[in-house]
């Protein structure tokens, strides 16, 4: 044990120095050796607790934090937030809820209360789950780090309770022993051999999942989206009675075939077989549990692909499809002839739609010429008489063509971009600075001018000449994520940057990466523009360094040595030597 006095201060300074050198493990051991002498005034106890949390020594961190609050009466937002987090990690959810209530964090309280409810679920929740996910009657599976292994008995309520609590992760064999299914699913995931930037892959996966969801619901099927716990999505379809596996598999495969799936993604339909033929069939991981390999919860999402707050209530609200809906869809996809309806060629002005109608109808669609009088002029119009295939094609085309794929990808992936687009649609106005951001992105994507025209054309002060000027001024370098955030803060734009955390591994950290599969757009950047940007950023850096130094000097005059100032998301400490330390928490 080290005695108090100079020896203690020497060890604490060694720990500070180890942190500066990023030798965090060494610093942690040094702090431990003088734990009883650490104080708030010099910031040492705060640093020690931070390292305990970072190295996941939660039990010791809990003791230190409780001592700070109870014995030392050190109540700060940081101590409460850190203690609540530690309680969560230790599974002391009730305590975490109490602290989050004191902090006024309603979202966290709701989330944890839902988790508590999952650990002690009502019978109604368990019954609903068992009814919806009614698969193979005599076997289910358990996920492990190595994969899944079958459990040769019926799924029981106690298994679902453990699944909800994250103690066990259930896989359901989709097909029942009589070759029927009570539910089906479409799995959208990143392919194993995909090598692209992860941010781009995740964005592509989400876009494809949204297309699948749109097409499935456009067919009149009720569907529900779940984040699979790793990197993909499940689109679930439930029925009020068992339906033949071959029917739902046929219909879902036909729907999936309409989507152009990139090579770096895979889309699979469950069930994967029409008949069991003596085997168990394929399984799929059930929602509301925890993915064993990632530790992430498999949660339901709303129609906008945002996490639903109350997962169990969402489960209760799931509606099953009538088996008759599937029968009707199966007939539409397999039957060439049916009740004929007339549609004018104006309704089929898209050549690709007409082609799909003819192909899917296999020649059953007949066209006949009619003479329609318009005033004194006789106009010849082609009228298509078609089966329900025509309605189905039109419905699906409408679902997929609701938004340009590039625009949809940017809107779904870049939070700032999506807010500007939403403003243009909602109030028909965006500021000049917001237009600059929009153009700074769209100038560097295919058909960017037309896309900008589509968005800004809805605003009350739209001018095509004005927009051309914006494109001319934008230069050859795409706006980076950092540039966008600087604009938002510098001009106090009413845009939320809380979800702007994208980090691309490419040379430029820009939303343009969501659209391009490679960095070919860099070839269009001029060396002169790059040189100007380098000079500009270097100048900004020098100015920032001068401003930071001045702020630190001013703060030294306001705070005494050993002071700690807690701020939202940051902590400022004045060390014994008078040095100002800024930490982001």
Image (cartoon, grey):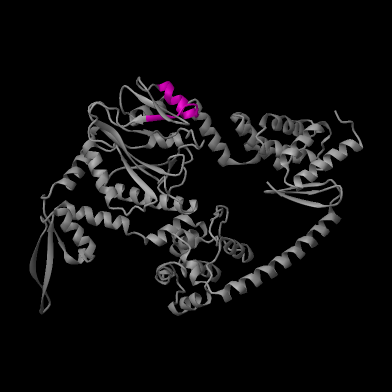
Going 28% across and 31% down the picture, which residue do you hit? 175
Left or right of residue 192: residue 7: right
Going 43% across and 47% down the picture, which residue do you hit? 305
Left or right of residue 260: residue 585: right
Q: Is residue 162 magenta?
A: yes
Going 61% across and 28% down the picture, which residue do you hit? 92
On-image quarter of the N terminus: top right
Placement of 92 over or under 18, stated as above or below: above
- Residue 51 lies in what quarter of the image? top right
Q: Is residue 554 magenta?
A: no
Between 427 and 151, the one nearer to me in the picture: 151
User: Could you tell me if residue 365 is visible in this image?
Assistant: yes
| Image x and y of residue 255, in percent | 27, 48
User: Could you tell me if residue 41 is visible in this image?
Assistant: no
Going 32% across and 54% down the picture, which residue do you hit? 260
| Image x and y of residue 209, in percent | 38, 48
Left or right of residue 328: residue 448: right
Query: Magenta segment, which residues?
Result: 157-171
Between 465 and 55, the one nearer to me in the picture: 55
| Image x and y of residue 374, in percent | 13, 75
- Residue 555 lies in what quarter of the image? bottom right
The chief SS type of the magenta part is helix
| Image x and y of residue 104, in percent | 63, 41
Left or right of residue 309: residue 337: left
């Amino acid at each position: 044990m080290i005695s108090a006095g100079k020896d203690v201060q020497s060890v604490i300074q060694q720990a500070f120095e180890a942190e500066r050198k990023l030798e965090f493990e060494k610093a942690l051991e040094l702090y431990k050796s003088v734990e009883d002498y650490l104080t708030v005034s010099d910031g040492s106890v705060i640093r020690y607790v931070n390292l305990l949390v970072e190295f996941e020594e939660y039990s010791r961190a809990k003791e230190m934090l409780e001592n700070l609050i109870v014995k030392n009466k050190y109540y700060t937002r940081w101590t409460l937030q850190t203690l609540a987090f530690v309680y969560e990690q230790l599974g002391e959810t009730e305590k975490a809820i109490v602290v989050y209530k004191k902090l006024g964090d309603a979202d966290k309280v709701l989330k944890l209360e839902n988790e508590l409810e999952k650990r002690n679920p009502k019978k109604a929740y368990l019954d609903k789950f068992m009814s919806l996910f009614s698969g193979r009657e005599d076997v289910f599976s358990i996920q492990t780090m190595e994969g899944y292994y079958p459990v040769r008995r019926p799924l029981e309520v106690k298994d679902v309770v453990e699944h909800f609590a994250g103690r066990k992760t259930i896989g359901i064999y989709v097909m029942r022993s009589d070759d029927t299914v009570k539910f089906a699913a479409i799995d959208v995931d990143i392919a194993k051999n995909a090598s692209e930037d992860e941010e781009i892959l995740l964005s592509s996966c989400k876009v494809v999942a949204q297309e699948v969801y749109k097409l499935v619901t456009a067919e009149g099927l009720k569907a529900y989206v779940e984040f699979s716990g790793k990197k993909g999505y499940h689109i679930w379809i439930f029925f009020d009675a068992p339906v033949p596996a071959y029917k739902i598999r046929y219909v879902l495969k036909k729907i999936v075939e309409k989507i152009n799936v990139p090579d770096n993604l895979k889309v699979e339909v469950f069930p994967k077989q029409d008949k069991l033929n003596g085997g168990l069939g394929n399984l799929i991981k059930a929602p509301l549990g925890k993915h064993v390999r990632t530790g992430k919860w498999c949660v339901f999402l709303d129609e906008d692909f945002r996490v639903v707050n109350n997962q169990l209530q969402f489960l209760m609200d799931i509606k099953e499809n009538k088996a008759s809906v599937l029968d009707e869809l199966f007939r539409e996809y397999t039957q060439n002839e049916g009740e004929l309806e007339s549609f004018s060629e104006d309704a089929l002005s898209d050549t690709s739609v007409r082609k799909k109608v003819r192909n899917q109808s296999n020649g059953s669609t007949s066209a006949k010429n009619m003479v329609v009088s318009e005033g004194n002029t006789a106009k010849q119009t082609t009228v298509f008489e078609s089966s329900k295939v025509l309605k189905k094609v039109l419905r699906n085309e409408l679902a997929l063509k609701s938004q340009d794929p590039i625009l949809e990808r940017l809107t779904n992936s870049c939070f700032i971009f999506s807010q500007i687009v939403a403003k243009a649609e909602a109030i028909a106005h965006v500021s000049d600075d917001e237009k600059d951001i929009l153009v700074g992105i769209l100038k560097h994507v295919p058909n960017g001018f037309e896309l900008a025209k589509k968005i800004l054309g809805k605003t009350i002060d739209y001018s095509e000449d004005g927009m051309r000027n914006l494109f001319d001024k934008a230069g050859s370098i795409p706006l980076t994520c950092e540039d966008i955030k600087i604009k938002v803060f510098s001009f106090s734009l009413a845009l939320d940057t809380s979800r702007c955390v994208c980090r691309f591994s490419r040379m430029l950290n820009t939303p343009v990466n969501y659209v391009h599969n490679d960095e070919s757009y860099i070839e269009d950047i001029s060396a002169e523009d790059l040189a100007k940007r380098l000079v500009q950023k270097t100048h900004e850096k020098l100015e920032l360094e001068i401003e930071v130094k001045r702020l630190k000097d001013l703060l030294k005059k306001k705070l005494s040595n050993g002071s700690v100032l807690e701020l939202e998301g940051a902590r400022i400490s004045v060390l014994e030597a008078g040095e100002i330390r800024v930490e982001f928490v």
